[in-house]
């Protein structure tokens, strides 16, 4: 049980900088998920916590102790690797018990603890097998057992589910959550799967290109993404992002204008990006709404996704009702104003003042076809 | 990287340097000795510092062993072995791996068994066959038809004789086979869908893809061919076909004269070692990759 | 178009080059034939290669086979007897002109020469007389006891290696046995039948080995081999060692290699005191004409053999090597024109003297044992064991004899039904 | 492992395999049948009618003390040489695998001895390890006969083993390094997280995972040790089986027996025994050892 | 453009039979998706059409010609492989043009057609690259280009998207559809991803264990799965399947009874499985609905999934509203009767008479808490 402090941490491989100064605090016992696209530096950060990667600059402290110079084994972390990294030549029992063996725990005691751990991860019947004779999910459990047995202060997971098939992934997700509830060690979990991130995290860290984009509770991030990057990365299908400009205290969006709250008067003339999630778009009643050019419809069984083009940019809408669209025909959507997001087009950052979204609440109901 | 402690690093370097002395040291001694004068090379203690006599010694060795001629012979033999092996093995491996043929397993085992029996243990009869390539046929024909044929084809004292028997083993075939097995099935299937037949597939796909293996095999076979010892010793009686390995003996300090001139001997053996060492050094990268993929 | 034919020989180094010279002389001397002479890098390899080539029907017309391979050749049926060849091709040879002590080695029991003696030698002992002078040794030792004396003095005078020896059985076993009238094998050293058995474990050979052992222990006799870095001849010519036993064939080389001004001499191999010295055995090799060649090549072969038997060729050959003339007339003429009195050649007559000292007998006529190469090797191994590894002399030689006899029995069985004539 | 997709043709594979199969039949199987024939007869050196003697040749071979001696030293040679070469290769591979700056340079050099012919290497070592000059002479200055392969059989055997090790250590190194590099980095990291230091990791994780490579090397190196052509060359160019049979390895003995001893039949019998031995040996290794070695 | 007829096709490898008699007709120009779990024989079937696998029994005809004995190249099919099977040593242009080269098309003509094809698949700028220097999506396009260039009558795809990451998969899906619209060749597409299958197929074939489970239009299959296997396989999260029994003309489901239409009187006493999709389940108004024991909630941002246990079997519900559930507490759901499916528990087949679902429409509204 320990808090992890990451202070101004940088990482360079030779001349290329991979992490550009990361500051994070992971409170004791929290389940933190680091989410980001491939190559953004998630693993690098995790491995620096573990001690597998040198820290180029900055400081990492675990439970208050700066660990920069410590060997992995001295940091009290346990790690579950993406490919599990099980020792293929050892039985499940030996895999789980290896850390104890190295630290010289007597055989009998070791045996007892291995059995205990195996019972927790449900591997009691497999203790004598080699990893090769296990299914994906079972291997995953061995990896967890091996990490658990040392009763680490910190659990690190590097995309532990990405090698499993979809069904298994869902059930292992549940198991990891249960395990965390049981052990309550500070856990850092790296993934690029936003569903995993959303469902597992107490606290979510979204990274991009070696920088932290946003930190917060998953739903918070979902509802108030701090940047277009986060907005597009979280949620599937991705949020529709449409380029526009603030003109006359309002944003023009296709055939509609969205008046801004007065506090945003300073934005006049600014290039902005308007975002709305496909699942928040509705088909408009005939004659109303924003018009887009239909492209095609994807039938998912449970609902469908209408793909269209609005302002020359792709626009998707997840809708429940059946529609018939012929490619090239116009189709009208309602964009509920309370679900609109506004971003600075240049920096990509969310525009919000005092926690108030930019578009005027009052104006929401008045969203009307523009005159153009 | 984990465990970059100064101690571990120092130990690592110590091991690598000891390895260097062990494996490369002998070369250094030979180079030192080969470039010293006769007095220096015979001095005790031996001085590891190279002298300036290498050219003189090498020239002496070159003449004593008549190396010029032998080098050319060795080169011809080596290239023929290398080329023959590289080409024939690829064909055989192709036949074994890519065809569904009842003979496939027969081919496989016929070739596999040769791995275990080098020339040394069957050298006398091999010599007899080389002396008259047609013996087996003649005997067979005679056995079945009673006709005694008179044709003969003698391989003694010829490049064919130096090379053909050495091409008749399995190493190369296995290298290719292992590599071919690792190629995804879909590659051949895609080619088939594209309308390519087996022969086209062989030339358009397999050969270009086997580049690394070909280079590795080239290296191995160059070393193997150049270093052939017993076979040329037996099969060549005509000095115009002598290879450098056969000259080693001549390079030894003459038995009838004074202080042994090891400096000349060493310079000579250095010259003889050089070509395969160069080949390995130059082709090292592919060689290593090819070697490793031949494993198992 | 000249008829080409091949001649394989085993000599290497300086002597090898002389053989090439002889071939050239022959080729220059006439227009009908061309001899192609090829060194096979050693006597043993020449025999090997000849056999392999014969099996492959690629044998040369003429091949040089050393003394030890004589019986192997005789039973091979792979050759044309010398006498027949010359007769067939119209050469008249006075076969009696050959020294019997030499010819007997290569002749049938009835005295018919099967091959041509060519480079004939015998073993002698080489002394560094300059060193002897410095050590105060006078005269050339004739007995092993005197050699031991001389060695002691040399040692006392600071010579680290008074006498060098290696494990060549030719001087140590074969020559020693002959001059001491000791049998090497039963059945007249094998002349009388293939059932001969080696007996050197029961003869004075053992005493000799014991003597050498004692000398070695006293550091008077020193082992010098290629494996140790230097064989006896270089040891002698580099003046590392002052005495050695070697072939008279080395006489030329030694003279050329020893620095100007160093005095040296050869003598007949020493005997043990009180021994009545017998003739020594002929060494070197003879030329065999192989069967199965085209007729035309035999003409050439006969011409070549005749050519090298001419007195001027004999003299040239003996001059440039140390080999002895094999015919009485050859020897006489060389003696007459004072060859043996001139500086570098002085002493070579010792060899002829040694070879003709007594009439050939069962023990001095020669050795006729199958696979003699292998027997030499067995004994050499035993000598290695004795002098390098302190093995027991008697049991080592017993073992070598036993193993050799097994080989002889196998040979006998292989040629079951063959008779020696 | 079978390939899924194969071309269908009867004559094409035969055509492709034919050249090599023909060579193999001619220069391998045909001579081998001759060896079989000679082993049961008494073959006269110059050929001609040979008497059938049943198992006599084998009896003679088996009754020969020196034969068993030769078997014994061959086993010593084929165990000590490969094991040491593999061990050195392993240590060097573990060191180079740490990828410290400069390790590429060492890696490049370590493989070079492989390119040197056994006999040529032997020649160099004859000088380097000659008791009277070169390196070993310096040893013998300290105390006479500290090193004297011409004298002591054990030294001579060690001498040829050293050449073997020198020649093959770099070769094993290459395989082992590749093996190490194919051990997933994450396994090492997992072990580091589990608290295991570099040496412990090598023993607990890396070496066990190299087992397949080690096994492969063991088989090939031991086969090389028993019958490799370089093994013959090394002995032939250095000790020639001596002193007193101390280095008469089986393969050397066979060639020596046949060509020096003119005992083709005995040599053939020995060849057959050797072939049988190697087959049994390989079979055992594949059947029993390999099973314990693969993890997938 | 050709119709594919598959008649009583069987496939055995040695003694194990992989396909147990498949009868299918793929009309000209249709986009057919074969969907099924791993190992069900999808690839085998496809490869038999392609001519890469021998047909053990039965007949396959392409455009009316029986092709059983024809070589792959003679069948007029092109195939896109799962791992693309690009020729690694050839440039993109050579890869695409290889088929033409083999068939001896002159160089200039070849060049022209390669460029044309490259333009269609958007690879014009990459023609000189080797496959290794391409991204996953680009490789995929090369594979498609290579297949297209021969203008085949039939396109075969063997899981061509499964090696791509999620985002790319979605966009490649669209590209394949567009390509199909453009070329209109009969296409057979194998996948085990039901979203891919639903969104791509004109006609969907669901396979299981070497047998065809159901053939039809995707939405049809979604709404009226022919078996529990299809029901569970299509849709995510999977349909809830609850074992029950017909008693007194009704099916008991947890705390509710569902009366059956009179036509189903013959089912009395039969063991059945009742199915309902999670997205059709609603939270019940307090005091109404079926009670289950809550387990946990997964927040997806756009909605959430409630996991519970009903009748001892897991039960999931996708709901829009926010809920708080404590594990172990009861939670009540409404199961709209019109969305219920009924299956024979023994055979797993759907129970439906004359296209009428088993549960009585009339009874739908009366779904009420049972008395028990
Ligand atoms: N040993 C290394 N040497 C050089 N660059 C490296 C090294 N390891 C990682 N990088 C680079 O650092 C960046 C971040 O890598 P990292 O593995 O942390 O990404 P990631 O977010 O974990 O991605 P993924 O989801 O693919 O695992 C990448 O651009 C990668 O190429
Ligand atoms: N060459 C073969 N020999 C023996 N069995 C085979 C062979 N190829 C496939 N099979 C078996 O046939 C069955 C069907 O294989 P197939 O490849 O068609 O499955 P699939 O549905 O494509 O699965 P996936 O989604 O994993 O690709 C499997 O059980 C497989 O093991
Ligand atoms: O050195 P050579 O020529 O005198 O020969 C010596 C012996 O006879 C060889 O066996
Ligand atoms: Mg990563
Ligand atoms: Mg498949």
Image (spheres, coloured by chain):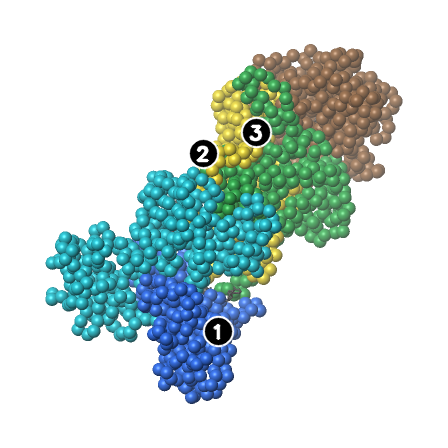
Chain colours: A blue, B green, C brown, D yellow, E cyan
- Give neighbour class at mark 3: few <14, some 14-19, many 20+ (Cα, 10 Å): many
The residue located at (56%, 20%) in the rendering is: B141
Q: Disc 3 beta carbon < 8 A from ligand 2?
A: no
Nearest the viewer among B188 and D36 is: B188
Report how far apart the C-alphas of labels 3 and 2 lie in the structure. Answer: 23 Å
Can the viewer see residue D110? no
Tag 3 residue: D26
Which quadrant: the N terminus of chain A? bottom left
Whether A154 is drawn above or below C268: the answer is below
Would residue B79 appear left or right of C311 to someone viewing this image?
left
- The nearer-to-camera label among 3 and 2 is 2
The residue located at (58%, 58%) in the rendering is: D103
Q: Residue C189's quadrant in the figure?
A: top right
Indicate which disc residue B102 carries.
Answer: 2
Would residue A344 appear left or right of C73 to someone viewing this image?
left
Nearest the viewer among B113 and A18 is: A18
Ligand 3 visible in quadrant: top right
Report how far apart the C-alphas of labels 1 and 3 lie in the structure. Answer: 70 Å
- Give neighbour class at mark 2: few <14, some 14-19, many 20+ (Cα, 10 Å): few
Q: x, y percentage for residue E130? A: 56, 55
Report how far apart the C-alphas of labels 1 and 2 lie in the structure. Answer: 62 Å
Would residue C2 appear left or right of A57 to someone viewing this image?
right
The residue located at (36%, 44%) in the rendering is: E6
Chain to which mark 1 belongs: A
Tag 1 residue: A211
Q: Are marks 1 and 2 on the same chain?
A: no
Do the residues under discs 1 and 3 have CB atoms within 8 angstroms? no
Whether B66 is drawn above or below C106: the answer is below
């Amino acid at each position: 049980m320990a808090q992890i402090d990451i202070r101004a941490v940088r990482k360079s491989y030779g001349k290329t900088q991979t992490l550009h100064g990361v500051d994070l605090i992971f409170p004791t016992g929290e389940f933190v998920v680091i989410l980001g696209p491939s190559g953004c530096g998630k693993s690098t950060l995790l491995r620096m916590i573990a001690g597998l990667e040198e820290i180029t600059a900055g400081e990492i402290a675990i439970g208050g102790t700066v660990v920069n110079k410590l060997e992995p084994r001295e940091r009290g972390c346990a790690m579950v690797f993406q490919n599990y990294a099980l020792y293929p030549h050892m039985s499940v029992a030996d895999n789980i018990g290896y850390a104890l063996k190295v630290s010289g725990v007597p055989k009998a005691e070791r045996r007892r603890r291995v059995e205990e751990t195996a019972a927790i991860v449900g591997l009691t019947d497999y203790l004598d097998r080699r990893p090769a004779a296990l299914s994906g999910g079972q291997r995953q459990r061995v990896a967890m057992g091996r990490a658990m047995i040392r009763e680490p202060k910190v659990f690190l997971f590097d995309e532990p589910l990405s090698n499993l098939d979809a069904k298994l992934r869902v059930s292992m997700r549940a198991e990891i959550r249960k395990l965390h509830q049981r052990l309550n060690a500070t856990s850092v979990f790296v993934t690029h799967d936003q569903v995993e991130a959303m469902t597992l995290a107490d606290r979510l860290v979204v990274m991009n290109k070696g920088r932290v984009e946003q930190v917060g509770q998953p739903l918070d991030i979902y509802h108030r993404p701090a940047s277009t990057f986060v907005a597009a990365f979280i949620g599937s299908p991705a949020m529709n992002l449409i380029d526009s400009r603030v003109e006359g205290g309002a944003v023009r969006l296709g055939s509609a204008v969205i008046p801004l709250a007065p506090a945003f008067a300073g934005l006049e003339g600014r290039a902005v990006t308007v975002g709305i999630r496909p699942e928040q778009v509705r088909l408009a009643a005939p004659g109303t709404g924003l018009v887009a050019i239909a492209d095609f419809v994807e039938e998912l069984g449970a609902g469908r996704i209408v793909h269209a083009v609005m302002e020359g940019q792709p626009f998707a809408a997840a809708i429940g009702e059946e529609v018939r669209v012929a490619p090239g025909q116009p189709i009208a959507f309602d964009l509920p104003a309370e679900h609109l997001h506004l971003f600075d087009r240049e920096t990509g950052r969310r525009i919000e003042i005092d926690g108030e979204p930019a578009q005027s609440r009052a104006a929401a109901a008045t969203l009307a076809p523009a005159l153009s | 990287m984990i465990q970059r402690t100064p101690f571990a690093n120092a130990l690592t370097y110590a091991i690598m340097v000891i390895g260097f002395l062990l494996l490369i040291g002998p070369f250094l001694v030979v180079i030192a000795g080969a470039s010293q004068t006769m007095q220096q090379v015979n001095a005790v203690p031996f001085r590891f510092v190279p002298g300036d006599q290498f050219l003189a010694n090498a020239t002496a060795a070159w003449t004593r062993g008549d190396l010029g001629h032998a080098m050319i012979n060795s080169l011809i033999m080596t290239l023929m072995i290398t080329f023959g092996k590289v080409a024939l093995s690829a064909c055989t491996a192709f036949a074994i791996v890519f065809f569904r043929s009842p003979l496939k397993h027969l081919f496989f085992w016929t070739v596999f068994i040769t791995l275990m029996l080098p020339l040394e243990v069957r050298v006398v009869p091999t010599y007899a066959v080389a002396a008259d390539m047609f013996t087996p046929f003649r005997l067979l024909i005679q056995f079945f038809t009673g006709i005694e044929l008179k044709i003969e084809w003698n391989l003694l004292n010829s490049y064919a004789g130096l090379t053909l028997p050495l091409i008749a083993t399995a190493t190369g075939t296995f290298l290719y086979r292992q590599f071919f097995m690792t190629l995804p099935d879909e590659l051949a299937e895609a080619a088939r869908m594209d309308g390519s037949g087996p022969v086209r597939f062989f030339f358009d796909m397999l050969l270009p893809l086997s580049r690394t293996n070909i280079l590795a095999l080239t290296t191995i076979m160059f070393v193997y061919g150049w270093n052939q010892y017993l076979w040329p010793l037996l099969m060549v009686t005509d000095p115009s076909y002598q290879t450098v390995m056969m000259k080693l003996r001549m390079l030894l300090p003459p038995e009838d004269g004074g202080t042994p001139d090891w400096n000349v001997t060493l310079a000579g053996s250095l010259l003889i070692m050089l070509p395969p060492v160069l080949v390995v050094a130059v082709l090292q990268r592919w060689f290593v990759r090819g070697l490793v993929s031949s494993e198992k | 178009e000249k008829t080409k034919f091949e001649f394989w020989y085993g000599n290497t180094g300086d002597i090898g080059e002389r053989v090439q010279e002889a071939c050239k002389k022959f080729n220059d001397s006439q227009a009908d034939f061309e001899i192609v002479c090829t060194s096979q890098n050693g006597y043993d390899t020449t025999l090997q290669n000849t056999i392999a080539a014969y099996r492959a029907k690629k044998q040369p017309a003429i091949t040089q086979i050393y003394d030890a391979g004589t019986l192997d050749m005789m039973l091979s049926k792979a050759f044309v007897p010398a006498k027949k060849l010359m007769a067939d091709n119209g050469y008249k040879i006075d076969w009696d002109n050959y020294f019997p002590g030499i010819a007997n080695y290569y002749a049938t029991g009835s005295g018919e020469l099967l091959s041509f003696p060519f480079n004939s030698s015998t073993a002698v002992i080489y002394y560094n007389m300059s060193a002897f002078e410095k050590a105060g040794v006078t005269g050339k030792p004739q007995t092993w006891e005197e050699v031991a004396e001389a060695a002691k003095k040399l040692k006392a005078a600071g010579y680290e290696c008074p006498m060098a020896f290696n494990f060549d059985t030719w001087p140590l076993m074969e020559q020693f046995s002959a001059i001491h009238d000791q049998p090497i094998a039963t059945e007249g050293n094998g002349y009388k039948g293939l059932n001969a058995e080696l007996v050197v474990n029961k003869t004075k050979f053992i005493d000799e080995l014991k003597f050498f052992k004692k000398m070695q222990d006293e550091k008077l006799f020193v082992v010098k081999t290629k494996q140790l870095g230097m064989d006896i001849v270089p040891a002698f010519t580099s003046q590392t060692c002052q005495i050695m036993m070697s072939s008279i064939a080395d006489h030329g080389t030694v003279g050329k290699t020893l620095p100007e001004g160093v005095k040296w001499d050869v003598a007949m191999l020493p005997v043990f005191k009180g021994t009545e010295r017998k003739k020594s055995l002929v060494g070197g090799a003879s030329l065999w004409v192989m069967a199965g060649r085209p007729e035309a090549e035999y003409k050439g072969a006969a011409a070549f053999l005749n050519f090298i038997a001419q007195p001027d060729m004999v003299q040239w050959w003996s001059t440039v090597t140390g080999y002895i003339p094999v015919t009485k007339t050859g020897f006489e003429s060389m003696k007459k024109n004072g060859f043996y009195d001139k500086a570098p050649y002085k002493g070579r007559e010792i060899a002829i003297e040694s070879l003709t000292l007594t009439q050939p007998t069962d023990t001095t006529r020669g050795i006729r044992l199958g696979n003699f190469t292998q027997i030499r090797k067995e004994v050499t191994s035993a000598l290695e064991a004795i002098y390098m590894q302190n093995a027991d002399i008697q049991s080592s030689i017993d073992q070598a004899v036993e193993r050799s006899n097994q080989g002889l029995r196998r040979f006998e069985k292989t040629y079951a039904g063959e008779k020696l004539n | 492992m079978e390939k899924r997709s194969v071309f269908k043709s009867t004559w094409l594979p035969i055509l492709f395999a034919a050249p090599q199969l023909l060579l193999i039949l001619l220069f391998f199987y045909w001579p081998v049948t001759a060896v079989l024939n000679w082993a049961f007869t008494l073959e006269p050196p110059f050929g001609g009618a040979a008497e059938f003697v049943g198992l006599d040749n084998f009896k003679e071979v088996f009754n020969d003390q020196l034969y068993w001696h030769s078997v014994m030293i061959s086993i010593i040679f084929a165990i000590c040489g490969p094991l040491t070469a593999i061990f050195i290769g392993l240590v060097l591979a573990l060191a180079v695998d740490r990828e410290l700056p400069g390790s590429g340079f060492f890696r490049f050099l370590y493989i070079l001895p492989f390119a040197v012919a056994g006999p040529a290497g032997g020649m160099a070592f004859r000088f380097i390890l000659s008791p009277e000059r070169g390196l070993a002479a310096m040893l013998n200055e300290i105390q006479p006969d500290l090193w004297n392969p011409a004298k002591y059989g054990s030294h001579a055997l060690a001498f040829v083993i050293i050449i073997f090790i020198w020649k093959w250590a770099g070769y094993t190194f290459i395989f082992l390094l590749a093996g190490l590099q194919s051990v997933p980095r994450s396994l090492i990291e997992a072990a580091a997280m589990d608290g295991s230091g570099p040496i412990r990791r090598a023993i607990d994780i890396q070496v066990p995972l190299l087992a397949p490579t080690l096994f492969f090397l063991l088989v090939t190196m031991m086969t090389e040790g028993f019958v490799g052509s370089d093994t013959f060359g090394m002995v032939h160019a250095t000790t020639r089986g001596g002193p007193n049979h101390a280095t008469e390895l089986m393969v050397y003995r066979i060639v020596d027996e046949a060509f020096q001893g003119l005992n083709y039949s005995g040599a053939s019998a020995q060849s057959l025994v050797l072939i049988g031995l190697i087959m049994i040996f390989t079979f055992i290794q594949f059947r029993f050892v390999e099973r314990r070695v693969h993890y997938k």
